[in-house]
């Protein structure tokens, strides 16, 4: 066979062994290239805009001017096995002609005739100095995975994350990284309500680097070391610990990844985690055995390279997430038209690095995480995963902003019957204001009140529909939470116009118009945006609420009203309605989470007081009729919020900060943020009251205006057909908006 004629070759039969041998054979050749920062094995990444992204037979030129990154590419079913080569920058065609020695070969040839493709990936470097950590705050004294772990070394604090609990049959330990806990006997602490609390001491059962061949006997010998980086904390009191991982819940059996079970089918696997600093993280497995150069030419290999889940959701892991456990985010399964019971998350890897790595003696920032297979760690340390210690707790804390907006709105309704119904169910929708006041005074910025498996309705869209268990999570939920209304189209149909401009005409408050606008924007701009549809989500829920009132379905109405609180809460946050949602367009710098969550959660008592002061004596009004007017009122809310505080101001100020970010952001924006939240409270209460009156709620008998069982509400929101999450295209094609 003529191996030089590769145009019609099929490489699908290549194995992990083939890829490792080819990578080893070409290691010296690739590593000498100045642009190359590391290599790995996996499957070919196809850019979403490439012709062969949807069609395996789509014509694709070998050279593409658009760089390939972990964010803009995916593994498809027809992706070839390959050696991935990570580079610092993407060469233009002219640069390639001028620097032929720096061109990564498209194929690697072995002496026995095997040919292995390469895939070049631009790593997206960020050489800015590391930002100091903000205030870490966890609410519960029941400690488990996802909590921060702290040690004091040379008068400096080291921060990492607890992964999960393990046992050697006698003692119970918390698993984290060796580099986090340090020498055996060192005191280890965590943070509870902002206070440092000791939890145990570093055990002498630790493992750092080990020969790759010794760890993975049976794979080709590689001249490198596996960086396992695992250590155990011997816990002082296991009664204060849980096997659950904060933000994830109970764990299932770990995934046993070894020489006999590991396959390239893992590539593209969706995964999630909860970092002790970054919080919720989602991503995908992009490669195995990432090999990079360290100081002095000493090579390391990481088992797993985890990258972003999609282009809009970068992997914002940072210092302090080391030790985080990554789990398989199992896709949702449908059985006879309904959701199957959600399975527990199965642990896959333990993160030890990411974002900042040493390469050629300098720090570089990369949007991925590096992890070791947990099954390998358990084998090397001779421990087993614990899954059943003190489980059954609610795995999340709520967002103060969403909860307060919902609770305040309950007190702003003037219709007597509706007010009575809401007041009886305020602890289903949110928490009553007095509870929030009392909790903030006690420093409890998290779950103010526990429910047995029930999530208060105001945060169901985030905690259940976006990031809940696989069986009830909704794939199309994300775009319902935002709308980039300030992005300007460069195209011919809407030249120089934004959605804020277009919606000055009521006729453009139309999902078909928005869908066309987004298509034009994405086709004519380097910065892409998902099709955010927040006003239409409010339209959809409003008309459903009216229908529920007409049909006297009180449970459905309360559930929908509580859920609506979340979207209106999003609508009154400046960053949710902007192309600057997490930084300058096309960038992600962490400002969104810092502003909306960390800043508010760090000052709960001041937030509560400031919002109530901004509301003053205002009350709800019946001011809309029909879903379209409800959507128009949300767009007007966008405009009113921007008069108080623009997203550009928030992003610009955040970029000037180097320390104490939550406090300084509150000092700068606290009063105006409270005004924005007050606008949201009033808009939410007015939408509730308008829907109630429009549906004839005053005709509902008083004996139906009762406190609703949490089980009945949970049954509603776990049903995917209830307030179904849709895309703009779905709304247009299915005519769901009247």
Image: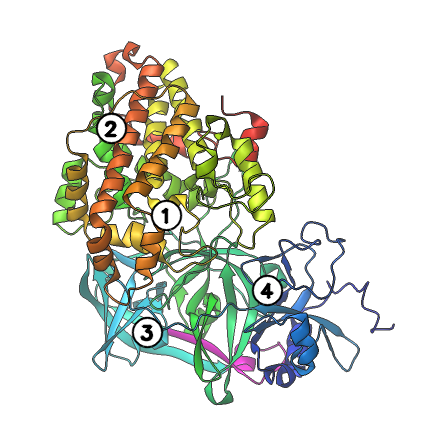
Q: Mark 4: give few (<14), some (14-19) or many (20+) Cα within 10 Å.
A: few
Q: Which residue is mark 2?
A: 425
Q: Is residue 529 left or right of residue 84?
A: left
Query: First in sequence: mark 4 or mark 2?
Result: 4
Query: First in sequence: mark 3 or mark 1?
Result: 3
Q: Mark 2: give few (<14), some (14-19) or many (20+) Cα within 10 Å.
A: many
Q: Which residue is mark 3?
A: 180
Real-space CA distance between mark 3 and mark 2, rounded to the nearest whole angstrom: 45 Å
Q: Residue at x 44, y 52 (%)?
A: 345
Real-space CA distance between mark 3 and mark 1, rounded to the nearest whole angstrom: 34 Å
Element carrying mark 1: helix
Q: Are marks 3 and 2 in contact (CB under 8 Å)?
A: no
Q: Are marks 3 and 1 in contact (CB under 8 Å)?
A: no
Identify the image quadrant of residue 45: bottom right
Examine the rendered structure and indicate whether residue 640 appears above or below residue 106.
Answer: above
Q: Is residue 711 left or right of residue 585?
A: left
Element carrying mark 4: loop
Q: Which mark is residue 575?
A: 1
Choose between 247 and 175: the one closer to the eye: 247
Q: Residue at x 30, y 75 (%)?
A: 181
Q: Choose mark 2 or mark 1, whichever is in front.
A: 1
Element carrying mark 2: loop
Real-space CA distance between mark 4 and mark 2, rounded to the nearest whole angstrom: 51 Å
Q: Position of residue 445 (x, y in %)?
A: 21, 50
Query: First in sequence: mark 1 or mark 4?
Result: 4
Q: Position of residue 631 (x, y in %)?
A: 41, 29
Choose between 585 and 304: the one closer to the eye: 585
| Residue range highlighted in magenta | 211-230
């Amino acid at each position: 066979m003529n191996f030089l004629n590769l145009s019609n070759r099929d490489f699908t039969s290549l194995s992990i062994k083939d890829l490792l041998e080819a990578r080893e054979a070409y290691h010296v050749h690739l590593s000498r290239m100045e642009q190359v920062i590391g290599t790995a094995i996996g499957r070919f990444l196809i850019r979403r805009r490439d012709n062969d992204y949807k069609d395996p037979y789509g014509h694709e030129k070998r050279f593409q001017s658009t760089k390939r990154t972990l964010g803009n590419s995916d593994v498809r079913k027809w992706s070839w096995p390959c050696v991935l080569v990570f580079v610092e920058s993407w060469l233009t065609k002219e640069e390639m002609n001028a620097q032929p020695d720096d061109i990564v070969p498209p194929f690697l040839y072995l002496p026995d005739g095997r040919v292995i493709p390469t895939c070049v990936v631009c790593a997206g470097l960020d050489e800015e100095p590391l930002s100091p950590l903000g205030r870490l705050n966890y609410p519960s004294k029941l400690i488990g995975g996802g909590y921060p772990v702290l040690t004091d070394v040379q008068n400096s604090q080291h921060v990492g994350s607890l992964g999960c609990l393990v046992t050697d049959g006698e003692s119970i330990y918390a698993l984290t990284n060796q580099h986090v806990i340090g020498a055996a006997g060192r005191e280890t602490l965590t943070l509870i309500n902002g206070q440092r609390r000791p939890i145990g001491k570093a055990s002498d059962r630790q493992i750092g680097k080990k020969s790759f061949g010794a760890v993975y006997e049976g794979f080709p010998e590689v001249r490198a070391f596996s960086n396992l980086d695992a250590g155990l904390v011997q816990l002082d009191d296991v009664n204060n610990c849980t096997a659950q991982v904060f933000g994830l819940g109970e764990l299932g059996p770990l995934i046993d990844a070894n020489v006999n079970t590991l396959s390239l089918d893992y590539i593209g696997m969706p995964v999630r985690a909860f970092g002790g600093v970054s919080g919720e993280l989602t991503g995908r497995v992009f490669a195995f055995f990432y090999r990079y150069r360290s100081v002095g030419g000493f090579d390391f290999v990481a088992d797993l390279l985890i990258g972003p889940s999609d282009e809009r959701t970068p992997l914002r892991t940072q210092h302090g997430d080391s030790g985080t456990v990554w789990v398989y985010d199992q896709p949702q399964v449908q059985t006879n038209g309904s959701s199957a019971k959600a399975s527990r998350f199965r642990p896959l890897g333990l993160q030890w690095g990411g974002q900042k790595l040493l390469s050629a003696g300098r720090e570089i920032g990369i949007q991925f995480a590096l992890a070791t297979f947990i099954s390998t760690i358990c084998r090397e340390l001779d421990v087993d995963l614990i899954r059943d210690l003190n489980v059954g707790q609610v795995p999340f804390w709520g967002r103060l902003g969403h909860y307060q907006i919902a609770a305040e709105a309950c007190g702003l309704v003037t219709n007597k019957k509706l007010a009575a119904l809401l007041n009886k169910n305020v602890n289903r929708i949110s928490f009553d204001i007095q509870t929030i006041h009392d909790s903030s005074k006690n420093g409890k910025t998290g779950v103010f009140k526990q429910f047995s498996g029930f999530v208060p309705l105001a945060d169901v869209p985030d905690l259940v529909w976006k990031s809940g268990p696989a069986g009830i999570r909704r794939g199309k939920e994300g775009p319902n939470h935002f709308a980039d209304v300030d992005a300007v189209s460069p195209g011919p149909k809407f030249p120089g116009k934004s959605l804020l401009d277009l919606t000055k005409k009521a006729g453009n408050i139309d999902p078909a118009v928005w869908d066309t606008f987004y298509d034009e924007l994405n086709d004519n701009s380097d910065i892409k945006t998902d099709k955010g549809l927040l006003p239409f989500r409010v339209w959809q829920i409003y008309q459903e609420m009216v229908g529920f009132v007409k049909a006297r379905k009180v449970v459905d109405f309360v559930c929908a009203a509580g859920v609506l609180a979340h979207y209106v809460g999003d609508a009154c946050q400046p960053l949710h309605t902007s192309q600057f949602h997490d930084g300058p367009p096309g960038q992600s710098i962490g400002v969104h989470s810092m502003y909306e969550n960390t800043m508010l959660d760090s000052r709960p008592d001041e937030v509560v007081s400031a919002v109530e002061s901004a509301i003053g004596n205002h009350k709800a009004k019946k001011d809309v009729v029909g879903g379209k007017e409800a959507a128009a009122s949300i767009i007007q809310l966008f405009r009113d919020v921007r008069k108080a505080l623009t997203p550009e101001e928030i992003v610009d100020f955040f970029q000037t900060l180097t320390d104490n970010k939550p406090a300084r952001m509150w000092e700068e924006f606290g009063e105006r943020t409270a005004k924005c939240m007050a606008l949201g409270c009033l808009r939410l209460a007015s939408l509730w009251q308008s829907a109630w009156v429009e549906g004839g709620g005053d005709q509902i008998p008083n004996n139906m205006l009762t406190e609703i069982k949490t089980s009945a509400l949970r049954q509603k929101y776990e049903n995917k057909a209830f307030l179904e999450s849709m895309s703009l295209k779905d709304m247009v094609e299915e005519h769901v908006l009247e």
